[in-house]
Image (tube, helix red, strand yellow):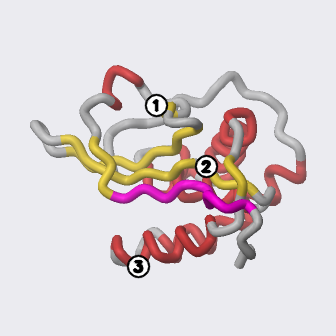
Amino acid sequence: MSDIVVPLEARQRLSANDRLRAFLVLPLVFFLVRQQPDRLERLLTTLARGRRAADRSLVERGLDAVVSVSRRCAGRYCLDRATATALFCWTYGRWPEWHAGAAIDPFRAHAWICVEGAPVREPTSLMKYFVPFISVGPSTNPDAPAT
């Protein structure tokens, strides 16, 4: 968990479909984020298999949706927020670049989402200090069977 909080964009009306998807992925998110890092990586890699890359607009919709239905995701819990956003995209058959890493001096752990290598709604001035330790991207073979 880090002290980086993603600011909410100007409130926009979310579709009932997006709110429902975000709400339905939360139980799985809360299970996943309690796993050991190696197991979390394996589980997310399995979920990402066969998914195409998510675009920025879907990831931003996902962020809006998960922070609107979960106070935990809207606050300091970046791992929950990044995982929920990835699973939101998963419900559309897509997968973003999911990262968990750290910065030193001072030590801070953080999880974030990228699209085409660019962090989504993260302060770019701070992101240069974070090194990803775990990364799960979309499947390189979109024809691989989804699980």
Q: Secondary structure at mark 3?
A: helix
Label located before the other in sequence (1 or 3): 3
Q: Main secondary structure of the magenta part?
A: loop
Dot 3: within a 10 Å radius of its alpha carbon, few (fewer than 14), some, or many (20 or more) residues?
few
Which amino acid does the dot numbered 2 rest on?
A: Pro
Give the mark, 1 or 2, whose residue is nearer the N terminus.
2
Given this view, does label 1 or label 2 mark the residue nearer the observer? 2
At x 70% / y 66%, what residue is drawn? Answer: 50
* SS class, disc 2: loop
Tell me the amino acid under the disc marked 3.
Arg
How many labels were placed on the picture?
3
**Tag 3 residue:** 39
Residue occupying image coordinates x 73% and y 27%: 11
- Magenta segment boundaries in residue numbering: 134-142
User: Quick check: marks 2 and 3 in contact, CB under 8 Å?
Assistant: no
Residue 110: percent from the left, percent from the top? Answer: 34, 47
Amino acid marked by disc 1: Glu
Measure how far apart labels 1 and 2 are at the Cα level.
15 Å
Residue at x-position 58% and y-position 38%:
115
Q: Position of residue 64 (x, y in %)?
A: 68, 39
